[in-house]
Image: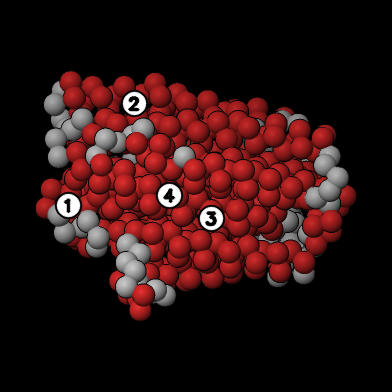
Amino acid sequence: MASDNTLTKGNLWHAIWLMSWPLVLTTVANSLVGLVDVQVAGSLDASAQAAVGLAEHVLFLFMLTIMSIGVGTTALVSRAYGTGNQDEYIKAAGQSFLLSIMLGLVMAFTASLTAQFAISLFTKNQAVVEAGRDYLTAYSFVLIPYSLTIIANAAFRAIGDSKTPLYIVACMTAINIAGDYLTVYYNFPVASLGIKLGIRGLAYAGLAGSIVGAILAFYFLKKSKLAPSLKALLPADPEMLKKICKIGIPSAMQRLFWALSVFVIFAVLTLCPNSVQALASWAVGMRVEALVFMPLVALSLAVSSIVGQNLGAREFDRAYAAGWRVTGIGIAMMFAAALVLYMGADLIASAMTSEPVAKTYTVAYLKINALAEPFLALAMVLGGALQGAGETRTPMLLTLLTNWLIRIPLSYVLAISFHMGVDGVWWSMAISILIHGLLMALRYQSKEWLKEKI
């Protein structure tokens, strides 16, 4: 399934299309899993729904490490692939696999053993703590197969192949969603034993899907141009590992800053009236919004590979133009998405929760955050272009600035000091996104990142 296209020649719009459409479908599939998880959890109770949202953000703290390795993988493999240096991109992919396997094992056991402690740090509601513990203890082991899949998909994208990741993720999604309904509603496969899986069924479904994904990733790697990378895992190459970490660590810090800010926002929401419903609406709103902006994730991943390959081929003008063209697509998509979110907020909220207060809060979340979606396109797509160039420091610093110096203080002031409640939190999110997008555009426009060496 690997592509021979290096993305460095011919019509640039064609290259963008070639990379983007499979990734849009891939990221929508990923988001559907999270949406179904929250929806099915809601059929249990509001505590389960809040627990899923919180537990998955706890797990994100571990996943961000693997994702950061993926950023380094894409930057290094795509740059070497663009220059035609096979030894370099094979070595980069192989050492990335080595890192992912080791970290996946360590993080899975750490997350499982600390599940209750981690959940209890962010809420004192006993029902949410217990549900979150049950979910996270089992779901933590998804980190082992998920790590390999993330890095394999990053390597495929880096060589211009975005269709293989689509196939892998589509299979994972189908199994996960089917498993959600079968385990929670029908207690499959233990119904005859009288065992009620409850929220743990969601975790088992996710684990099954991830195992299948890892098996498929290994199979397609063996059949691709990246096959030699499976033999390049050992011995460890300190120089290559250093390169991966140099690019990946700022990306990891960026995601860490964002993830930790989410927990602080979570804490602010617990101070608001009807805190359980506020947390449930936050979980629902985040999932719905994620489904809308998942295409931006796809465009970000696509432009990262395009920019990386073109910089490797020394096609600097083409690399720069690619960022703005893909961003234009993202802005247009987000204008359309914003209209859907704003005008359909009541229908969407009704479909996701039956609890009246949670529904009201969810409607407000969707309408307020819809206003910021076009600026989110600037932040995410141009940030992806910079990461493809190996320039991961700027996205990190802007995330730190807009989340910790703007969003968090503003959320407390509006929600608590100005007595706006949950609406104040939603407004702080929208305002910080607007500022983030504008600052990212200024950095990209400077062209300083074109000089980045990796």
The residue at which mark 4 appears reads as 136
Count residues near mark 2 (Cα–Cα under 10 Å), then give few for <14, some for 14-19, many for 20+: many
Q: Is residue 373 above or below residue 142?
A: above
Check if mark 3's residue and mark 4's residue have beta carbons within 8 Å: no
Location of the N terminus (image quadrant)? bottom right
- Residue depicted at 39% across the width and 63% down the height: 201
Left/right placement of residue 30 relative to residue 370 reads right
Task: Report, in whole angstroms, how far the alpha carbon at label 3 lies from the one at label 4.
Answer: 10 Å
Q: CA distance from mark 4 to mark 2?
A: 26 Å
Q: Which mark is residue 231?
A: none
The residue indicated by pointer 2 is: 408
Return the x and y of residue 85 as percentages of the image width and height: 86, 49
Question: Whole-Å distance between the Cαs marked 4 and 1?
Answer: 26 Å
1 vs 3, front mark: 3
Considering only order in the chain, which callout, 2 or 1, is on the residue closer to the N terminus? 1
CA gap, disc 1 and disc 2: 24 Å
Residue type highlighted by circle 3: Val
Q: Position of residue 216 (x, y in %)?
A: 65, 68
Question: Which secondary structure lies at badge 2?
Answer: helix
Label at residue 359: 1
Callout 3: SS: helix
Quadrant of the image for the C terminus? Answer: top right
Earlier-in-chain disc, 4 versus 1: 4
258, above or below 161, in the image: above
Of callouts 1 and 3, the N-terminal one? 3
Residue extending farthest left: 356
Q: What mark, if any, has residue 142 been given in the picture? A: 3
